[in-house]
Amino acid sequence: MTSYRNRMLSGMSTSLDRQRRFLGTLVNEPLSVGALAPSSRRLADHMAVDIVPGSRVIELGAGTGSLTRAILDAGVEPSDLLVIEQNEAFSEMLRKRFPGIGVITGNALGLNRHAGALPGPADFVVSGLPLLLFTPGRKLRLLYQVFSVLSEEGAFHQFTYGGRCPVERAVLRRLGLEATLLRFTPMNLPPAFVYRLQRCR
Ligand SMILES: C[S@@+](CC[C@H](N)C(=O)[O-])C[C@H]1O[C@@H](n2cnc3c(N)ncnc32)[C@H](O)[C@@H]1O
């Protein structure tokens, strides 16, 4: 009983530590974090929709690991998950929290250089990047790379707090992509929308 209680308490303090670390980074680097709090578990599950055991996944902007947890809980092997996070303290936290996954400390716009760390083309790229703060040109560069590392049927999942797709129509058209609203997640701070981008069929 005591050890169960201790485990619960240590789990709670870990989660509190993550919240604290997230808030500290938000205060110091608001434009790179772009969120008030880590994603809720419900949003994380919505971002992991259709990810199954055997999927190869790249996660961009993993923060303290809310989406990472849901991706692994969907049955993805740690060796099939590669995470790119630019903040060093978050990357270190991710390495400790999820042994066996690939963690690159770097810019998601350098994705092409790192994707070879996976054993094959990715099935999903899951992004927690604050895309609303990216210029259209930066989104174009990012998505060009994303779709060069995804398999033919692969999908890009992105959440946003705005009620519309955070990627402009012109950018989608240029890359031959279509966007679908997958989920609305009211149980998140703030409520979020999950979009899926895929090649037009
Ligand atoms: C909105 S937070 C999302 C964190 C986490 N995925 C979640 O859902 O709780 C955005 C994260 O993206 C990271 N980030 C922002 N721009 C980035 C970039 N260009 N390359 C890699 N990571 C980036 C930030 O450091 C931060 O951890």
Image: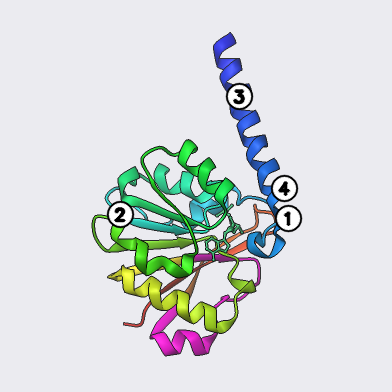
**Measured from the top left, where is residue 11 in percent x and y?**
59, 28
Residue type marked 3? Ser
Q: Nearer the viewer, mark 4 or mark 3?
A: 4
Label 3, on which residue?
Answer: 10
**Badge 2 or badge 3: first in the primary sequence:** 3
Counting from the top left corner in percent of width and height, residue 122 is at 31, 62
* Colour pattern of the rendering: rainbow
Q: Is residue 160 magenta?
A: yes
Inter-mark Cα distance, 2 to 1: 35 Å
Q: Which residues are magenta?
A: 158-179
Tag 4 near tag 1, CB within 8 Å: yes
- Please say if 89 is above or below 27: above
Q: Earlier in the sequence, mark 4 or mark 2?
A: 4
Judged from the image, the secondary structure of the residue bearing numbered disc 2 is loop
Estimate the spatial distance between the alpha carbons at disc 4 and disc 3, rounded to whole Å.
Answer: 21 Å
The kind of residue tagged 2 is Ser
Q: Secondary structure at mark 4?
A: helix
Instruction: Name the quarter where the N terminus is drawn.
Output: top right
